[in-house]
Image: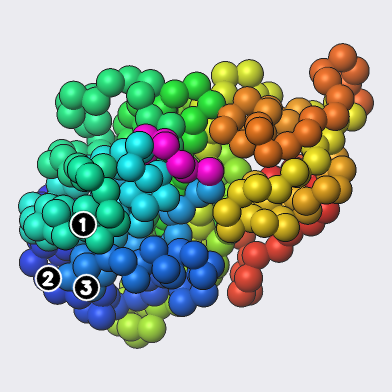
Amino acid sequence: MDVIKDVQDYYGKTLKTSADLKTEACCTPDAMPGYIKRLLSNIHDEVLIKYYGCGLVAPTVLEGKRILDLGSGSGRDVYALAQLVGAKGEVVGVDMTEEQLAVANAHLGWHQKKFGFKKSNVRFLHGYIEKLDRLGLKPGSFDIVVSNCVINLSTDKAAVLKGAFDLLKPGGELYFSDVYADRRLPDAVRNDPVLYGECLGGALYWNDFHTLAKQAGFKDPRLVEDRPLGVTDEALAAKLGPAKFFSATYRLFKLDDLEPLCEDYGQAVVYKGGIQGAEDIFLLDKHHAIERGKAFPVCGNTWKMLNDTRFAPHFDFIGDFSRHYGIFAGCGTTIPYDTGSGASTSNGGCC
């Protein structure tokens, strides 16, 4: 199986629109914030119908930021993010499929005029996400790296994560959605070209992903949201057997001094508000829904994820690292995803 060629053919030739997909893996749920829907309404129809993502990759506080999209496809997420970074920001898309890049590039001028910018703040590069160091991008030059249901298609996921880490500025983050399995998949599943193209064959066992992320330098992966995936095609479901799959969004911060576990230093934060899409509650991750104006206990790692990143101006910080109280309550090692619908949040705790 030539994975790269098979994936290029599947997304460049086999799939014509998102309606041709055989599973729910590379699809986005209808529920999304109103401001995101407004962004998407400004995107060209041809770009939208050739979108095959599995989640939302629109983190907050993006004005003026520089963003890299891994596996940008027809450019839907790039053009959505371009509106959020504004005329002073930039969004760079990378993809290996020429047919998808042709669609993305065909509408550069159309979107520039639609957004009212004097010049385009978007560009697309032909390349491989496993080989980001060959694209002429300066290390440490991006505030955020995003990806939408693409890393599972890579044959060298460790190289993708390390490449993203190297391109991020200190305090930057990799914010991405992808597909994960509840177990390591057998070769028959991993080598099936249709299952691979449908974002299932290349899905990582979630705990293996955590290991790879930490090896790349992302010391404390945070799960933002997840949902179980259904496989409605009976023939494909039979090939998959008992394995369960999840679409999940993670944020991985480039912070050198994070600890292996969530440690308690008696700290808290107060969200001051002022973030679009998070007027009353700021969602750092699945277990940190931080209500505006209320002191919220946090572990040392969470404190740094807010204090040492672009989010700092929106928070007041209570405490320091002068006294240690042991492990932060709530840490665990079981599968992090919900088997039902929806994501849970709490008033404090460890991811």
Direction from residue 233 to residue 45 in the image, left or right: left
- Is residue 158 shown to the viewer in this render? no
How far from the left and from the top, in percent, is residue 301?
Answer: 70, 30
Quadrant hosting residue 266: top right
Q: Which mark is residue 14?
A: 2
Q: Answer with mark 3 or mark 1, whichever residue precedes in sequence.
A: 3
Alpha carbons under labels 3 and 1: distance apart: 15 Å
- Most foreground residue, 22 or 289: 289
Q: Which mark is residue 37?
A: none
Q: Amino acid at mark 3?
A: Asp
For the point 35% across and 57% down, which residue is it? 80
Q: For the residue labelled by badge 1, is the local secondary structure a helix, a strand or a loop?
A: helix
Q: For the residue labelled by badge 3, is the local secondary structure a helix, a strand or a loop?
A: helix
Residue range corresponding to the magenta coloring: 61-67
Where is 174 relative to 42, above or below? Answer: above
Q: Residue furthest top?
A: 322
How far from the left and from the top, in percent, is residue 74?
Answer: 20, 59
* Residue labelled with disc 1: 113
Circles 3 and 1, Cβ within 8 Å, touching? The answer is no
Q: Which quadrant would the C terminus be assigned to in this image? A: top right
Give the label, 2 or 1, closer to the camera. 1
For the point 60% across and 43% down, which residue is it? 222
For the point 46% across and 53% down, which residue is it? 58
For the point 53% across and 48% down, which residue is it? 60
Q: Is residue 63 found inside the magenta-colored segment of the image?
A: yes
